[in-house]
Image: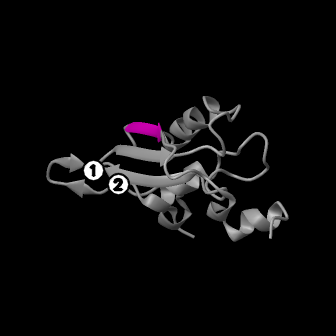
Amino acid sequence: MDDHTARSEPLTTWTPDGETAPAITEEAVIAAIATVYDPEIPINIFELGLIYAVEIEGGHVKVEMTLTAPACPSAQELPESVRLAVGTVPGVTEVDVETVWDPPWDQSRMSDEARLALNMF
């Protein structure tokens, strides 16, 4: 395995103006979000269906997410955890996380893996 296949970070490229920032992919952002777990449920928030949208524009990433309920005890913690996790993706320079309530979250938004883990079939 050479140095290029052993890297986990995206490679930068060179242009006449110098090195470019790594390209941010939706897959990399989702992988970062998937490291955030709801403290009351042992499933990551992406599999729980709490992420509604990911928008990438240059180094700026915007995430729209919801919570399982408006009175969720993690209402302050989870969006901040998402912001910090997405900020670790190479090339990300700014992260905005917006908590939205429409449409409301329900169990149908969960992945099959999350439903299986929680025995909710």
Relative height, residue 96 to residue 64 (above, below): above
**In-image side of 69 versus 99 (left or right):** right
Residue 71 image offset from top left, x and y in percent: 67, 33
In what quadrant of the picture does the C terminus appear?
bottom right
Q: Is residue 95 magenta?
A: yes
**In-image side of 58 versus 73 (left or right):** left
In what quadrant of the picture does the N terminus appear?
bottom right
Residue at the image position 32 percent from the left and 48 percent from the top: 21
Residue at the image position 40 percent from the left and 45 percent from the top: 62
Would you say residue 89 is visible in this rendering?
no
Tell me the kind of residue under disc 2.
Answer: Thr
Q: Assess whether mark 1 and mark 2 are in contact (beta carbons under 8 angstroms).
A: yes
* Mark carried by residue 20: 1
Looking at the rendering, the stretch of residues picked out in magenta corresponds to 94-98
Q: Which residue is mark 2?
A: 12
Front in this rendered view, residue 120 or 87: 120
Would you say residue 46 is visible in this rendering?
yes
Residue at the image position 61 percent from the left and 55 percent from the top: 46
Q: Which of disc 1 and disc 2 is earlier in sequence?
A: 2
Q: Main secondary structure of the magenta part?
A: strand
Q: Is residue 30 magenta?
A: no
Is label 2 in a helix, a strand or a loop? loop
Hey, which residue is sitting farthest top in the picture?
Answer: 76
